[in-house]
Image: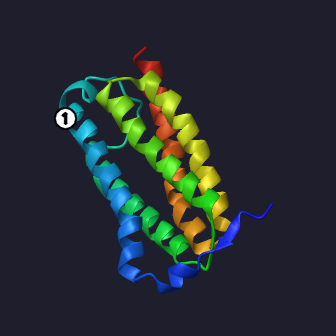
Amino acid sequence: MNNAVPDLPSALRPLWLDLLIAVAPVVLASVIGSAATVPQIPGWYAGLVKPPFNPPNWIFAPVWTTLFAMMAYAVFRIRRQPLQAQWALVAYHVQLALNLLWSCVFFGLNSPLGGMVVILPLLAMIFATVAAFGRIDRVSSLLLWPYAAWVSFATLLNLSIWWLNR
């Protein structure tokens, strides 16, 4: 079954509309995720035992800003393709929701174990999104690989923090 459908209106849609539709969910996830994360850094997170490979706190903001920008550009490119697979856009938005949920669970609920429960399906959905995007637009797929790598590292970090603080 071919789930790719012609999106004739994309040729007629203004560029700014697809840009807004691509950027707004990423900004929303970033703002809400930061609201759950930032207040926990000086207190709860600072008090956790962390592995020696834990990056300094200052690195997270520029890395996430770059990754979110790459994600938004990737989904913008997908939206501008003449053929869109709805599964690709669903996978993208599910992984984005899981990304936000991870911040809320790990930091907001102060739960490294809960973070593990969320980050594993998040990682799976990122790889599903990379594959789905790859069938539509190779550049969009490539734009998500740094994100997949970072969340793979974050999974190891999350597991290590849980293990060291259980």
Q: In this view of the protein, which residue sits in the foreground, 75 or 3?
A: 3
| Horizontal relation, residue 9 to residue 108: left or right | right
User: Which residue bears the numbered disc 1?
Assistant: 39
Q: Is disc 1 placed on a helix, strand or loop? A: helix
Residue 51 image-quadrant placement: top left
Q: Nearer the viewer, residue 42 or 31?
A: 31
Residue shown at 27%/37% (left/top)?
36
Compared across the picture, whether 55 is left or right of 141 comes to left
Q: Quadrant of the N terminus?
A: bottom right
**Residue occupying image coordinates x 42% and y 74%:** 18
Q: Is residue 64 visible?
A: yes
Q: Nearer the viewer, residue 50 or 111?
A: 111
**Residue 62 percent location from the top left of the image:** 31, 57
From the viewer's perspective, is residue 123 above or below residue 115? below
Q: Residues within 10 Å of mark 1 (few under 14, many from 20)?
A: few
Q: x, y (%) of residue 3?
A: 71, 63
The structure's colour scheme is: rainbow
Q: Is residue 84 above or below residue 122?
A: below
Indicate the quadrant containing the C terminus: top left, top right, bottom left or bottom right: top left
Q: Amino acid at mark 1?
A: Pro
Residue positioned 24% across, 29% down in the render: 46
- Identified at 39% across, 17% down, the residue is 165
Residue 43 in the figure: left or right of residue 70 = left
